[in-house]
Image (cartoon, rainbow, N blue to C red):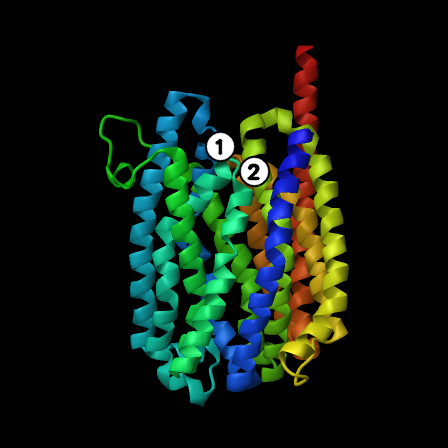
Amino acid sequence: MASIVRTLGLSATARVFTLPFTAVATILTTYLLVRELGLESYGYIVLVGALFQLIPFADLGLGAAVVNASSKRLESRELSARALATAGATFRVLALSALVIVAAVFLVGNLEAWPSLLGLPDSLATSASWAIGIVILPFALSLPFGIGQRILIGEGRNHIVGYIGILGPLTATATTYVLLKLGVDPLVLGIATPTGILIVSLVCFVLALKTSGWRMRDLLRVRKGRSKPKLWNSALPMMVISITVPLALQSDRLILSHLSQTIELSEYSIAAQMYVPCFSIISMAAVALWPIFSRSGAASLSLWSKAFSSLTGAGGVLAVIFIFLVGPVSKLVTEGRLAVHMDLALAFGTLLVVMACHQASAVLLTSPSHLAFQAGCSTAMLLVNLGLSLLMAPALGASGVVWASAIAVFITQLVPCIYKAQKFMRSTTVEVNSWV
């Protein structure tokens, strides 16, 4: 129990410490874009800049295998060698994935399909064929280096990842300022967030090599005579989760761009940018529990209820803060031209609570079979969310797609995974008692 509290405390403290810097950087980036380019262009720039969130499956779910292997690295020499083999194989596969992503993005650009896919206005459509490729490039480059974060998380250094993460929004703000001064095409400004991700990935990667004692050539070299690491038992269901969850939640912007007014897209984008730092406090704390559950196995099950209540309570507090601050802050950053209305604030607040409730189960159920169960839940969530969003967006606008997400997550992920976690705990308890 002490390890749960300490782990949650370290991760939450790191996020709370960095949150003011992240919030200021995010607000300043929004202010610069709205002031220089207006609300309409701002909404589409954020849409393009967030495209990488629609292709998180680019890591092929391999991060789960790296976390699980790294969490057991210090237990024996054999497990240490297996962790290195897992990290090396993952690095090489993700380097190939990055090349495929870049090729696919430029192919879509050459076909001049981006304007119709994203619902871009004529004023931005001309440059989309090449600008979006430039925006995606830093994200693609970050993919293989992203294993550094997974290694650190597996080693119980999630709070260190949190402190390093502050470089992301700071880099994004600095990049936005420089590019605005250079007068680049508006869509190119979407590169700011992916550039921040690349910087964070590189720093974490260098630190992970240092803490593990591995060298770059250790990751690149294919070791013959050793059994290949079993990457795909966890990676395949994790890849499904990595596709369905972000696709469901991040498709909101695409739906709004096609079925609602431009102002709704801009309002949603501003609210979402403030929602993400709040949820990141919860997600960072939850991810820090992953290696504890992975190492402890059955012994970790009794800690699930404590993690559940702690994360749910934190989600409730953050939701209240978000609901009451998002309106005034949105007015401030847009100089009074746009304010997030209470219906959208309540929708995001509800989503925050639902997602917080789900995190304890999400990081407990990480064995291959449990990840397969979660993959089924997330697939159902995608289908329900898209259906509800298409129905609710025309009537409710920005709040409609967020309410759709909250309802879908509650029905198809939160409830089934709580049931699965409790069943897992009961079956383990019965098994232990049978041996007593």
User: Which residue is pictured at 75% across the width and 42% down the height?
Assistant: 309
Residue 174: x percent and y percent?
A: 46, 69
Residue type at numbered disc 2: Trp
User: Which residue is pictured at 41% across the width and 36% down the height?
Assistant: 211
Callout 2: SS: helix
Residue 105: x percent and y percent?
A: 34, 68
- Regarding residue 300, the answer to whether it shows in the image is yes
User: Which residue is pictured at 52% across the width and 39% down the height?
Assistant: 157
Find out whether the residues at labels 1 and 2 contact each other: C-beta distance under 8 Å: yes
**How far is disc 1 from disc 2 in space, using C-alphas?**
9 Å
Q: Residue furthest top?
A: 436
Q: Is residue 376 left or right of residue 55?
A: right
Callout 1: SS: helix
Viewer-proximal residue, 408 or 196?
196
Residue 132: x percent and y percent?
A: 38, 73
Q: Vertical placement of 266 versus 348: above or below? A: below
User: Which residue is pictured at 40% across the width and 76% down the height?
Assistant: 188
Dot 1 crowding, Cα within 10 Å, few <14, some 14–19, many 20+ = many
Residue 318: x percent and y percent?
A: 72, 56
- Regarding residue 59, the answer to whether it shows in the image is no
Marks 1 and 2, the one that precedes in the sequence: 1
**Quadrant of residue 104 within the rendered picture:** bottom left
Dot 2 crowding, Cα within 10 Å, few <14, some 14–19, many 20+ = many
Q: Which residue is mark 1?
A: 71
Q: How many marks?
A: 2
Q: Vertical placement of 134 versus 9: above or below? A: below
Name the disc covering residue 290, or none.
2
